[in-house]
Image (cartoon, helix red, strand yellow):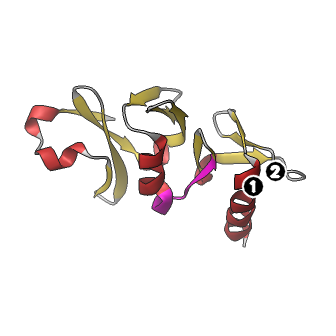
Amino acid sequence: MEIQNLSQLPPSTLSIKIVTLLGRQYLLVPDQSKIRRVLVTDIVRLEGVKNYTLLHLRNGDTMLSSRTLKVYDTILQEADFLRVHKAHLINMQCLRNYDKSEMQFAVMQNKDVITISRRKRKDFQERITVSIS
């Protein structure tokens, strides 16, 4: 994870976006005073907490962003992330297990258990079916 000062970056880079460097996708995450560059594959899940978002990484670290989960949802859809609850966006590549009978929860690689809302179960089931085929 690399940290850059805001003073060195043009104002257009202060929004969240995915950039590709040397064939790897990075998410630029604005913090209070800096931009953090995080490998998209290192993100296990994102958790919405009011108007903030917690990014949970593979190494166990968490990052706090002052952007809402909705902002991340629109950007990370292309990177195989799925919104399974109003407060949870998961990386489908980090999905370890799920409740196959009723689709009520998902277990991630870092052993976090995420509730799947009733309204999102159909989307989750469709994504699982596509990824298995």
Q: CA distance from mark 2 to mark 1?
A: 6 Å
Q: Which residue lies under the disc numbered 1? A: 121
What residue appears at the point 76 percent right and 46 percent down from the top-left corner? 97
Dot 2 alpha-carbon crowd within 10 angstroms: few under 14, some 14 to 19, many 20 or more: some
What residue appears at the point 61 percent right and 53 percent down from the top-left corner? 92
Viewer-closest of 118 and 44: 118
Report the amino acid beneath label 2.
Answer: Met
What residue appears at the point 37 percent right and 41 percent down from the top-left corner? 38
Residue 68: say if magenta.
no
118 vs 44, left or right, is right
In the rendered view, tell whether residue 95 sits above or below residue 30. below
20 vs 39, left or right, is left
Looking at the rendering, which quadrant does residue 1 occupy?
A: top left
What residue appears at the point 22 percent right and 43 percent down from the top-left corner? 14
Residue 83: say if magenta.
yes
In magenta, the rendered stretch is 77-84
Residue 104 seen by the camera: yes
